[in-house]
Image (tube, rainbow, N blue to C red):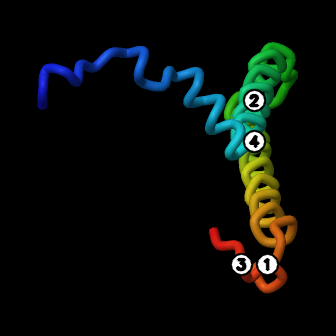
Amino acid sequence: MSSDESWSPSEEDSQASKLARKSRDAPFVPIGLAGCFAVVAYGLYKLKHRGSQKMSVHLIHMRMAAQGFVVGAITIGVLYSMYRDYIKRPDMKNNPGSEE
């Protein structure tokens, strides 16, 4: 490695720019994470007012809701990605001169 090639942190992508780029590539992942955090926050709020429900049952219900939200968001994201790649994209048969 030569001394001309010095590393500086400004040359690297920051964490915020990496997150923004990943969010543009897969927009439903941050939505799923936000939904998971929202369900967890709601569960913590309702923990105080759960009534006669056992703690373990309450936690299981909140875990299932958070996981369901994340799995649903990822599924919608995969379906959107498949739509964007296979349906919205012009056919290669109609455009024989263009290559990807």
- 47 vs 97, nearest the viewer: 97
Q: Which mark identifies residue 27?
A: 4
Residue 87 seen in this snapshot:
yes
Image point 84% across, 23% down: which residue?
50
Left or right of 97? Residue 79 is right
| N-terminal label among 3 and 4 | 4
Kindly tell me whether residue 63 is visible in this rendering.
no
Are the two marked residues, 2 and 3, in contact with CB atoms closer than 8 angstroms?
no
The residue where tag 1 is placed is 95
> Mark 3 — residue?
97
Write down the quadrant of residue 43 in the picture: top right
Helix, strand or loop status at disc 4: loop
- Of residues 58 and 67, the one nearer the viewer is 67
Q: Does the CB distance between marks 3 and 1 fall below 8 Å?
A: yes
Residue type, mark 4 in image: Pro
Q: Secondary structure at mark 3?
A: loop
- Where residue 10 appears, x then y in whole percent? 42, 15
**In front of the other: label 2 or label 3?**
3
Quarter of the view holding residue 40: top right
The image position of residue 52, as x and y in percent, is: 84, 26
**Total marks drawn?**
4
Task: Give amino acid for label 3.
Answer: Gly
Assess whether mark 1 and mark 4 are in contact (beta carbons under 8 angstroms): no
Q: Which mark is residue 34?
A: 2
The amino acid type found where label 2 is placed reads Ala
